[in-house]
Amino acid sequence: MDYFLSEEQEMIVDVARQITDEMIIPQRAELDEKEEFPDAILQTIAQADLFGLYIPEEYGGFGGGCFDMVLALEQFGRGCVGIATAFAANALGAYPMLIAGSDELKQKYLPEIASGKKYAAFALTEANAGSDASGIQTTAELDGDHWVLNGTKQWITNAGEANIYTVIAITDRAKGPRGATMFVVEDTDEGFSYGAKEKKLGIRASSTRELIFKDCRIPKDRMIGRQGTGFITIMRTLDQSRPGIAALGLGLGQGALDEAVTYAKQRVQFDKPIISFQAVQHILADMAIQLEASRALVYATARNVDTHKTGVSKIASMCKVMATDMAMKVTTDAVQVLAGYGYMREYPVEKMMRDAKILQIYEGTNQIQRNVIGQELNKEYGKK
Amino acid sequence: MKIFVCVKQVPDAKDVRLDPKTNTLAREGVQSIMNPYDRHALEEAVRLKEQHGGTVTVISMGPPQAEATLREAISCGADEMALVSDRAFAGADTWATTYTLSMAIKKLGGADLIICGKQAIDGDTAQVGPGLAERMGMPYLTCVRKVVSVAGQVIRLERMMDDGYDLVEAELPMLFTVVKEINEPRIPSLKGKMKAKKQELVMLSAADIGADPDLLGLKGSPTQVVNVFPPEMRGERCLLEGTADEQVAQLATKLEAIL
């Protein structure tokens, strides 16, 4: 379907498509198997000017928005959600600075992220703070000119590979939701270390570890925004990043549909290609319907996020839920179409199905997304 | 350093057909690409520019549609592009082509370094690089697999040989041709693509480059193609089976019978 992309957006798609076809797809199975971080591919993405796609030109980026990122992430997701996650996690790490950071902080860190010289990561989750962010135990206390961080972050994407971490910690527990603040921690900071690399079901080319802070001292000016604004910054970050996760779902769904249709045309049973059987056609048709409907919602949402800076939480959650539930369904169906072959690692769809699951879990489970949507509906109808 | 890279638009090797009547390459409906060796030449030029400064100009002699290949080169890091295009160039062999290219490069102010692909995958002559160097009065090296260093006017190169490589030193200005082992060409960047869209194309005709009409195109080409035909399949093929030792024994018997 024609979504009336601008000439610039067509170019973003072209560049991302070429990287996906020439680098990501040929390497995805090996990186998944070896659980290897895709450093060379990330550097290619950086060289192609896509690392700083969403970063303003004054900080060395391309000056694009949420929709531009969606277009690039859709292509990368078509190739490999693991590699695409390693890329996308940089944006998630950078957004808090972009949204709430001081100009000094932006000048210091964003150009290095935009050029791909340094990788970024975002740290919210803890053992007792998943869906319930109020369970955060990590603390930051002011000591002269320094903040001192203590605590452990869990399941942090790009941990151990990134150089720049945006971390939320409690600065005043008595203030509840207004008692959390975001900070920038560098990989070389004293008192900062990593846990062991996690073994995962999918997205195995991305790296996931704990961040451990033991009296980790960072200069006072590493605070992002004002004290107590951590949760607000995170909510605004997620408004930007959730359409990106939805875009990974779109790409993954497209990749799975491509594999399923191609296979169904070639596979002969009962003397006919299996695509000639209605039982198979209907599965493929349902995959295509859900995919295109999701794409329409994700694109429309991303365009809204770019034009309306606030009040986009509901649609950001809606597109995340729809596109990632679709990806889970469509990849599962693709395995069914390829049947026995689909279950084997020789074909890419088993990996696609494994990778799909995380999309329903990270950046807020799809149940939490529905909470957001429900709460927004409650507010909207309360005004009437 | 002023670097020129010669690029040629060629039919995609995956899709080559001969016109059965004229015995020339059928170009209609065939995807055109940048000659793969030229991609490596371009990449090396862009890397040299990134390390040592200067400009990279891509130049092509060809029909107007070769503009697409030049724009692709800009998206991969070239700074300027020139298309040498005129009906008078049609039917040129490598003798006339090198004359035309040399006149165009001189017209554009000359070069410190010219880099070409080893050969084009359509004609496969591997003559344009060396021929152009002769026309320019430059030393040249072919089949370069590595640029070791550039210091002042001295360039050190590794030239690939059948049994290893030669380490050769040459003085600029010079020309070298590259093999695909020299580098991994980059994927076009977003800013490169945007530049490619806007970049002005320098168009040069036979008159613009001040060429002698008698030395151009078919008229200026001593090579006349009499016939082009696919080779007939000859000889008998057989597959030897068994263990390695058994296969060697069978092969030896067959060879003895021939000798």
Image (spheres, coloured by chain):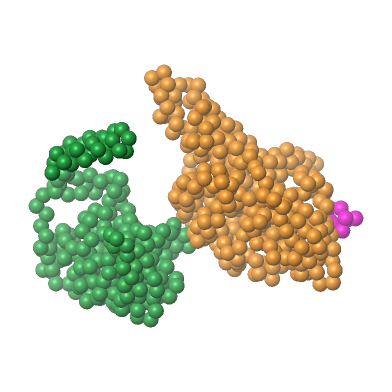
- The correct choice, above or below, for B33 with respect to A265 in the image is below
Q: Among all residues in the image, which is located at the extreme top?
A: A270
Q: Position of residue A16 (x, y in %)?
A: 49, 52
Q: Position of residue A82 (x, y in %)?
A: 58, 46
Q: Is residue B4 left or right of residue A185?
A: left
Q: Among all residues in the image, which is located at the extreme right?
A: A174
Quarter holding residue A54: bottom right
Is A177 covered by the magenta stretch?
A: yes
Residue A84 visible in the displayed image: no
Q: Is residue A338 left or right of residue B13?
A: right
- The correct choice, above or below, for B4 with respect to A353 in the image is below
- Please identify which colour was used for chain A in the image: orange
Q: Between A348 and A279, which is closer to the camera in this rendering?
A: A348
Q: Between A303 and B135, which is closer to the camera in this rendering?
A: B135
Is B73 covered by the magenta stretch?
A: no
Residue range highlighted in magenta: A172-179
Q: Position of residue B257 (x, y in %)?
A: 14, 39
